[in-house]
Image: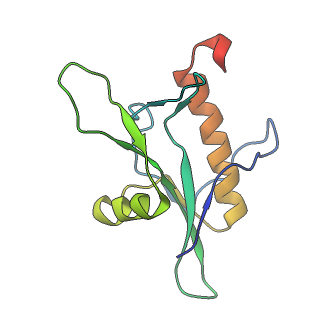
Amino acid sequence: MANSPNNKAGPRGAAPPLPIVPGNINLNNRPVVHSADGSISTVKSATFTVGPHGNEKYLLIPTVLANRPRPGNPPSGRIVSGDEAFAHFRATGQHLGLFATETAADTYAQHLHEAQARRYLPKGQR
């Protein structure tokens, strides 16, 4: 299992690649991590190589996990290491999609990042 952070930009305006297995996470209720610079993270992710040699697939897993919920507060989160994110996947099965190539996973991650920014950030901060 290898992992790589997703920070590669895809072509603007192009449709994101489709996963061969869709993700199973509710993207409309993600935990939010607020950074000192005013940015947020909801679906920061890492790509993991899975499967036997010669038939590898690329699994996109969020590295933003929810903190323990507090009554009356919106979901808050924390950014975790790739190892902790993969352990969370193994325990819960939660992922953002399985892809045929690493490039497809990374491009999808970039599109997802941009879509979440449009959803969660005020218009002037996107």
The correct choice, above or below, for 98 with respect to 2 in the image is above
Estimate the x, y position of residue 31 in percent, counting from the top left.
39, 34
In front: 111, or 7? Answer: 7
Q: Which of 11 and 85 is in front in this view?
A: 85
User: What colour scheme does the image use?
Assistant: rainbow
Write down the quadrant of residue 4 in the picture.
Answer: bottom right
Q: Give the residue drawn at x 60%, y 40%.
A: 112
Residue 17 in picture, x, y percent from top left: 68, 52
Residue that lies at the very extreme toward the front in this rendered image? 36
Is the residue 1 above or below the residue 64 in the image?
A: below
Picture layout, residue 68 above or below residue 98: above
Q: In which quadrant will I find the C terminus?
A: top right
The single residue placed furthest to the left in the displayed view is: 71
Q: Quadrant of residue 119?
A: top right
Residue at coordinates 56% horizontally, 31% vertically from top-left? Answer: 116
Question: Which residue is painted at 38% across and 31% down in the image?
Answer: 29
Q: Position of residue 121 (x, y in %)?
A: 56, 20
Question: Picture coordinates of residue 65 (x, y %)?
Answer: 38, 45
